[in-house]
Image (tube, grey):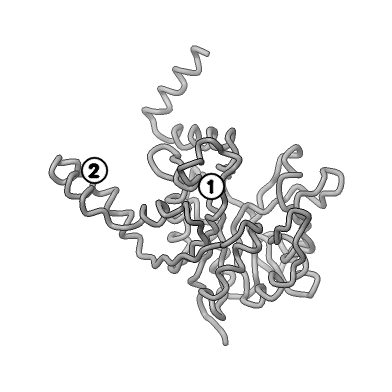
Amino acid sequence: MSFNSIKKIIIPIAGLGTRMLPATKAIPKEMLPVLNKPIIQYIVEETVYAGFKEIILVTHSSKYSVENHFDKSFELEATLEKRVKRGLLKEIKAISKLNISMQSIRQGEARGLGHAILCAKRLIGKEPFAIILPDMLISKDNGNAGDSFKEMRLNFEKHKISSILLGKAKKADIPKYGIAQIKRNSKLSGLGLVEKIIEKPSIKKAPSNLYAVGRYIFNNNFFSYLSKVQPDKSNEIQLTAAIDNYIKDNNKVSAFSLDGEIFDCGDNAEYILANLEFAMKDPLMRTKIKNYLKTR
């Protein structure tokens, strides 16, 4: 069966956010605010802009507030209307009018990102699908944060080749991510084809400094590779291991370059930097921050 467009996207939100404890003890990390919006709202807005209409949340029993955030809130809207808070009312109404469908499925046990994606297989059916990680937040000065992801989707619909978005890691950060080796191909859009990808290599063994920034598109046959991945020492199924096996079996994966700056909001320092990055886009906040820093 051939699909002319790709509509479905998986957002895995079942993780417990242990790197952000104790803040995430009772609040999902996806609901932590960057300025006045939770991280997950930026992610969903990027998803909508990129052209994906059907969101599948792979979730956990503690994450009900994520879904609730995108529901219509009659009581809150009535209160804002009564208090003539029309600016806020417009923002709140916009959240529930994002023109998406949202389904959820539980990840019954914490067995890694690859396992979370497998949990969504039944809801994907036989269609191609995308993945976006909910803690990797893109900032872009010109254009939209979803420009790179949109380019990937349009390329997939034209060529039907799986794809991955890559950024450039600082040398010290290489052991934190999945690192890719690329073969240039002038006939393809983007950086070329991924030759291999290694999960969290040492700096010496890393094939490059290009790392996966949490945006992927796959043909449906990728699920068969995910289901065959052997668990690692932590009994987790790694997404990068499935991608590497997929490539070794002569399936093509295109690489695209991140346009913008990305922040890993599951890391305390980068979460603070993300807030500063977005705050500096606001003239009033930028002035206050600059004045504050002068006193330190």
| Mark 1–mark 2 CB contact (< 8 Å) | no
Residue 57 seen in the current view = yes
Secondary structure beneath disc 1? strand
**Amino acid type, label 1:** Ile
Q: Residue furthest right?
A: 204
Distance Cα–Cα, label 1 vs label 2: 25 Å
> In the rendered image, is residue 261 in sight?
no
User: Of the residues shown, which amino acid type is indicated by label 2?
Assistant: Gly
Q: Is residue 267 above or below residue 121?
A: above
Query: Between 96 and 229, which is closer to the camera in this rendering?
Result: 229
x, y (%) of residue 175?
A: 76, 44
Q: Which residue is denoted by mark 2 in the rendering?
A: 87
Residue 6 located left or right of residue 92: right
Which residue does the image show at 77% across and 65% down from the upper left? Answer: 230
The residue located at (41%, 22%) in the rendering is 288
Label located before the other in sequence (1 or 2):
2
Q: Residue furthest bottom?
A: 1
Disc 2 on helix, strand or loop?
Answer: helix
Q: Which residue is mark 1?
A: 138
Which of the labelled discs sits on residue 155, or is there none? none
Task: Answer above or below: position of 183 versus 273.
Answer: below
Q: Is residue 3 left or right of residue 190?
A: left
Q: In the depicted view, which residue is nearer to us: 20 or 106?
A: 106
**Residue 176: image location, x then y, percent:** 72, 45
Snapshot quadrant of residue 20: top right
